[in-house]
Amino acid sequence: MPMKLAIGDVVRLRKPHPCGGFEWRITRIGADIGLLCLTCGRRVLVPRSKIEKRIKTINAHRDVPNP
């Protein structure tokens, strides 16, 4: 079952980005997850299967209405 993620959530990953930042904002949801580094502003696309293993915590979780 996929992890419940929403656009705008801030997540903390297990390993740091080369700039030293751990915090990322989710910008895209789908088969690939779009992330924005909150330290340097770099945008990356990571397959959902990989990112779900790398997420340590979800720091800011928005309530998403159910359709």
Image (cartoon, rainbow, N blue to C red):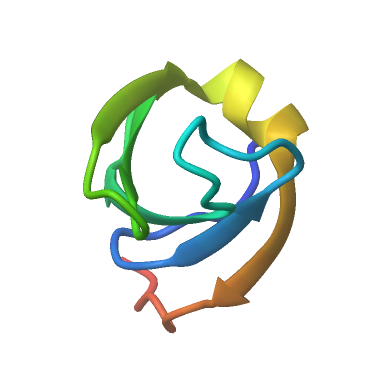
* Outermost residue to the front: 19
Residue 1: give x, y in percent of width and height.
Answer: 72, 35
Residue at the location (52% across, 35% down)?
A: 17
* Residue 31 in sight in this render: no
Residue 54: give x, y in percent of width and height.
Answer: 71, 33
Q: In this view, does 13 lie to the left or right of 67?
A: right
Q: As displayed, is residue 66 above or below residue 47?
A: below
Q: As displayed, is residue 51 above or below residue 24?
A: above
Q: Quarter of the image for the C terminus: give it.
A: bottom left
Residue at the location (30% across, 67% down)?
A: 8
* Residue 32 in sight in this render: yes
Residue 15: give x, y in percent of width and height.
Answer: 72, 36
* Foreground pick, 19 / 53: 19
Residue at the location (39% across, 60% down)?
A: 6
Q: How many labels does the image show?
A: 0
Residue at the location (52% across, 24% down)?
A: 48
Residue 18: give x, y in percent of width and height.
Answer: 50, 30
